[in-house]
Image: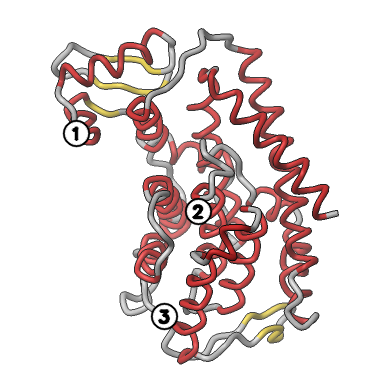
Amino acid sequence: MLVRYLTESSKLESWVRQQTLDVSWIPKSQRDALVRLAHYSTRIEGNPLTLPEVEALAAGKDIPVEERAKKEVLNYFAALSWIWKSSSRDVSEKELLKLHRILTDGLLPKDEVGHYKAKANAVFGGGRVIYKPPPPEAASILTNQLIDWINSAEAQEEHPVVVAAIAHHRLVSIHPFMDGNGRISRSLESWLLYRRGFDTQHIFALDEFFEHDRERYYKEIQQVRENEDNLTSWVEYVGEGILETLKKTQTRIQALRAKKPSSKIILTASQERILQILVETPSMGGGDLVRALRVTRSGLRKIILPLLSAGLIKKEGSTKSATYRLA
């Protein structure tokens, strides 16, 4: 089954990449993935916000919801933004601890944010302990062993989905932090899929698959532990999820293209960066974009004009005080 999942997923991922010549759908799909990843990953951990409420937060709106729930989602937005900007970096202990700090900032005591656990913890289910993770003194050792494997030649030869799935399960089983282990494990999976070129436009949300059958998600994690750490069933499960998620992504792309046919342009790296920035930030001034891209004002105009002509972004206000947002 795994071979079929990976083969079909690779074909679909290739199809998605080929569609990037027609970029009218990219910003909408990126914002959609940002929202869905943040919503479903935090929802797995019990966050009560609805998808429309998370969409409103992504649009920069201040909504009357419980502050901790809002903070969890905003932190996840920040974590995904950081991941998308860090794709060229090797996964390292320093970067992983930084990712945990972004995810848990303001949610945990300061001595637990971005730091390994200092005391034993456990995973509960049905009012009882179902899994005892390794002790605190093993957290750093096991995490670094996992990072070494992720960066190894062996892992480079594996299919990106296989590597991401294994890293997800190993990190959540090491359980190196007092809290946030599920969120950082799913974030690491997204990071590896993007870094290994399997989600180059960061437009699909695997966590939606996990959350829609949360009981199965936890059961699949636990099954590996009860089967002497044999990861075969888990990797097949993630492969199934990737395929289902890519099929949904394909349907969304086709719907977006049908709604708004657009001229085809090939994006430069700077134009891609502008679209990414505007996915993460609802509106940004020209001066801020100049600083973010490290270009001159005239250079920014040359980069932005094709995006304006293609209807991908909109300009509001006069030249010097103009702001830009997604169309």
Picture layout, residue 275 above or below residue 88: above
Q: Which residue is labeled 1 in the image?
A: 294
What x and y, as percent, mark residue 199? 56, 42
Residue 207: which disc?
A: none
Rendered residue at 46%/52% (across/down): 73
Left or right: residue 140 compared with residue 299: right
- Where disc 2 sits, the SS reads helix
- Spot occupied by residue 249 in the image (x, y as percentages of width and height): 66, 34
Residue 275: x %, y % from top left? 39, 28
Whether residue 149 sits left or right of residue 100 in the image: it is right
Q: Secondary structure at mark 1?
A: loop
- Residue at 52%, 66% (x, y): give it: 152
- Using the image, determine if residue 112 lies above or below residue 197: below
Q: Residue at x 53, y 91 (%)?
A: 135
Q: Which residue is mark 3?
A: 116
Q: Identify the amino acid type marked 3.
A: Tyr
Q: Residues within 10 Å of mark 2 (few under 14, many from 20)?
A: many
